[in-house]
């Protein structure tokens, strides 16, 4: 039992564990062209505004990608599909050529990963330092989707979503099938 007044800020470990319980989408943000390309995995991507169409994501201070995301920079937003967990890990790994074993092409002078769930082109607008991250917003200039299943990240592992049987949760099903 927690008595009023006894709450205290969670440790970094608890904070990370709480948010590891929250499933996220997985995207790779790409920038540059030719040999000057770069990309990194993000789980913080979200829609922000409809009018104008804006998205947002957060990058840790010191990230290599962040250095490249100045206002006005054009970026590719590659929303990954369920079979692209290896790509998600690769684009989160420092010190390797992340594009080397990845199927990708260049479109609108941006690296575009093949076979994603969705692809957008955006232009960085705001960079807001908040804590140890920067919140970035980007105006969406182009977007398309494919009929694929999303890649999800949950408790530090990759998943694909599956339907609930007749809309019931596992515990509801167990309760309803238990002998009375
Ligand atoms: C599923 C997943 C989601 C991630 N989400 C983010 C994120 O939203 N922001 C961030 O700064 N790093 C995130 N990372 C970690 C970066 O991808 C990782 O630190 C990467 O090396 C950054 O590359 P860079 O230094 O070239 O920018 C995530 C990693 C994984 C595997």
Image (cartoon, grey):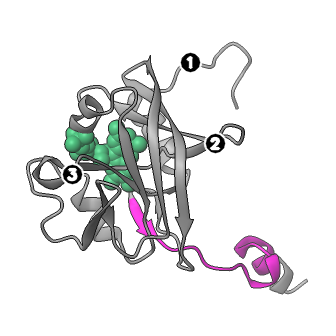
Residue 170 among those drawn in magenta: yes
Q: Which residue is mark 3?
A: 33
Spatial distance from mark 1 to mark 3, Cα to Cα? 47 Å
In the image, farthest residue toward the top: 5
Which residue is at the front of the view, 106 or 92? 106
Quadrant where the image shows the N terminus: top right
Residue at 75 percent across and 72 percent down: it is: 169
- Measuring from the top left, give residue 82's x and y in whole percent: 45, 75
Tell me, for residue 104, which label it has, or none.
none
Query: Which residue is depicted at the point 21% across and 36% down?
Result: 64
Describe the element under mark 3 as helix, strand or loop.
loop
Q: Secondary structure at mark 1?
A: loop
Q: Quadrant of residue 113?
A: bottom left
The residue most toward the right is: 180
Marks 1 and 3: CB-CB under 8 Å?
no
**Is label 3's Cβ within 8 Å of ligand 1?**
no
Range of the magenta residues? 157-174
**Number of numbered labels in the structure image:** 3
* Mark drawn on residue 53: 2
Q: Is 60 rendered above or below residue 132?
A: below
Please name the residue shown 43% across and 70% down the image: 116
For the point 71% across and 42% down, the residue is 50
Q: Is residue 166 left or right of residue 132?
A: right
The relative height of residue 51 versus residue 3 in the rendered view (above or below) is below
The circle on residue 8 is: 1
- The image quadrant that residue 162 belongs to is bottom right
State which image quarter holds ligand 1. Answer: top left
Q: Quadrant of residue 165?
A: bottom right
């Amino acid at each position: 039992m927690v008595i009023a007044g006894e709450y205290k800020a969670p440790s970094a470990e608890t904070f990370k564990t709480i948010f590891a319980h929250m499933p996220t989408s997985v995207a790779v943000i790409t920038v540059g062209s030719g040999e000057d390309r770069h990309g990194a995995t993000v789980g913080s991507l979200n829609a922000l505004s409809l009018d104008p169409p804006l998205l947002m994501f957060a990058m840790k201070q010191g990230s290599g990608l962040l250095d490249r995301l100045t206002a006005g920079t054009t970026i590719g937003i590659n929303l990954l599909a369920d079979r692209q967990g290896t790509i998600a890990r690769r684009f989160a790994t420092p010190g390797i050529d992340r594009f080397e074993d990845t199927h990708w092409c260049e479109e609108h002078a941006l690296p575009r990963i093949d076979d994603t769930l969705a692809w957008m082109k955006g232009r960085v607008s705001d960079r807001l330092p908040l804590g140890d991250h920067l919140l970035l917003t980007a105006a969406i200039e182009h977007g398309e989707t494919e009929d694929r299943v999303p890649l999800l990240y949950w408790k530090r592992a990759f998943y694909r979503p599956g339907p609930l049987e007749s809309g019931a949760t596992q515990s509801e099903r167990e309760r309803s099938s238990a002998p009375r």
